[in-house]
Amino acid sequence: MNILKSYIREGEHQTQDFKFRVDDAKKIARTLAAFANTDGGRLLIGVKDNGKVVGVNPEEEFHVIQGAAAMYCKPELEVKTQIMQDDHKLVLEVSVDEVENKPIKALDENGVWKTYVRREDHTLLANKILIGVWKKMRTKTSTPQIFDEDEQLILNTIEEAKEITLSKLYRATKLRKAFVDKLLILFITWGVVEMNITPGGTYFSVRERV
């Protein structure tokens, strides 16, 4: 089976995105950075959103991709490319590996360096909690056997709500925001709380105890 056709059959998802062509190097840098901050991924340039192969000039697209990865990703991102073919049409495959030291940042529309992640077929902004979790993961701490009163209050509030946004958690616990942030980061690092980033918002829930 043609490998390009098998990729296209998968559709767009967390580790795959189709691009008709690359017009905006800054915008594509955000997708590349999001892949690197999540599970890695591939861009198929010369493919419409509906999976129709339209083809591109790979050399032209390659230069834009290289520029995006070098100038609009921080630190500079390494990408791998290869040319694929469907009949007489050429498609540029751009692959990005997940990086160990997150985050890779990319420029937003206003020229501000921001952090992006990939969720399903969406490129989304990462929040301060996830960025804090990445930092904390570099120096792992062991999960305590018991939680103090404030820690238990946060956990109980999340558990009662089933899932809750950060702003609602602040209001419900009446604790200092920085303190809640710090504990949430620890809970996620310890595997006690889950964070679900979606296009409609970010939600926290307590992991089921095994």
Image (spheres, rainbow, N blue to C red):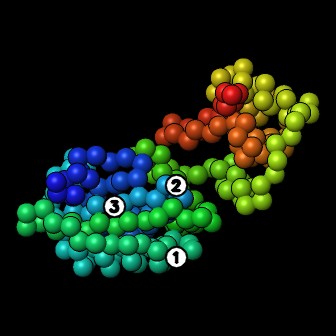
Residue toward you, 141 or 72: 141
* Badge 1 amino acid: Glu
Percent across and percent down for residue 88 are: 7, 67
Residue toward you, 107 or 145: 145
Q: Nearer the viewer, mark 2 or mark 1?
A: 2
Percent across and percent down for residue 56 are: 19, 69
> Viewed as shown, does residue 111 lie left or right of 150?
left
Q: Residue furthest top?
A: 160
Disc 3 element: strand
Percent across and percent down for residue 73 are: 51, 71
> Which comes before the other along the chain, label 3 or label 1?
3
* Badge 3 amino acid: Leu
Residue at 57 percent across and 74 percent down: it is 75
Q: CA distance from mark 3 to mark 2?
A: 14 Å
* Badge 2 amino acid: Thr
Q: Residue furthest left?
A: 88
Work out whether 117 lies above or below 32: above
According to the picture, the residue beneath numbered tag 3 turns out to be 43
Q: CA distance from mark 3 to mark 1?
A: 18 Å
Residue at 70 percent across and 40 percent down: it is 191
Percent across and percent down for residue 89 are: 12, 66
Work out whether 35 lies above or below 168: below
> Which comes before the other along the chain, label 2 or label 1?
2
> Which comes before the other along the chain, label 3 or label 2?
2
Residue 76 circle label? 1
Q: Quadrant of the N terminus?
A: bottom left
Q: CA distance from mark 2 to mark 1?
A: 16 Å
Q: Quadrant of the C terminus?
A: top right
Q: Residues within 10 Å of mark 1 (few under 14, many from 20)?
A: some
Residue 38 circle label? 2
